[in-house]
Amino acid sequence: QVQLVESGGGLVQAGGSLRLSCAASGRTFSSYAMGWFRQAPGKKRAFVATINWSGGSTEYADSVKGRFTISRDNHMKMVYLQMNNLKPEDTAVYYCTAGPGSARTLEPNYWGQGTQVTVSS
């Protein structure tokens, strides 16, 4: 069992930066791939970024490549999403997820409660 708690969301102007954090509990954290998804109003939850168990492999949605960076600290049981050059279309609730698989094949078994990111133009 893994429990996930996100933090770090907020209101930022376009072009600004935020760093989201996801604190995990559970003995199997370091064996799971981790990821970030987001859900904008009226839209389905969408993939943002994933990272494999060791942190050596990552995947990104085309819309965030070059602007967002996912990382993890297995010792601290933390996952991060550094978001730079934010755009209004990045506005969404961001969810942390964990599950088996690689960065490319993550199966989201566990979800956090989400953190709101709002980017003003």
Image (tube, rainbow, N blue to C red):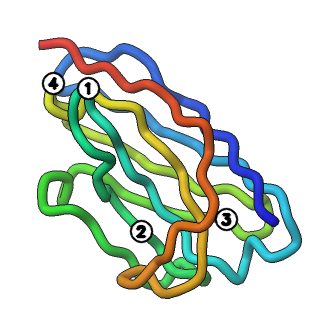
- Write down the residue under mark 3: 73
Which of pointers 1 and 4 lies earlier in the amino acid sequence?
1
Q: Residue at x 59, y 82 (%)?
A: 100
Mark linked to residue 88: 4
Point out residue 41 in the picture as x, y percentages from the top left corner. Answer: 26, 26
Q: Residue at x 67, y 65 (%)?
A: 73
Q: Residue at x 22, y 29 (%)?
A: 42
Specify the quadrant that holds the N terminus.
Answer: bottom right
Secondary structure of the residue carrying numbered label 1? loop
Q: Quadrant of residue 49?
A: bottom left
Which of pointers 3 and 1 lies earlier in the amino acid sequence?
1
Type of the residue with mark 3 = Asp
**Mark 4 → mark 3, Cα distance in angstroms:** 29 Å
Point out residue 47 in the picture as x, y percentages from the top left corner. Answer: 31, 58
Secondary structure of the residue carrying numbered label 2? strand
Point out residue 77 in the picture as x, y percentages from the top left corner. Answer: 75, 61
Badge 2: how crowded within 10 Å, few (<14), some, or many (20+)? many
Mark linked to residue 41: 1
Residue 57 vertical position relative to residue 98 in the rendered view, above or below: below
Type of the residue with mark 1 = Pro
Type of the residue with mark 2 = Thr
Mark linked to residue 50: 2
Badge 4: how crowded within 10 Å, few (<14), some, or many (20+)? some
Residue furthest to the right: 27
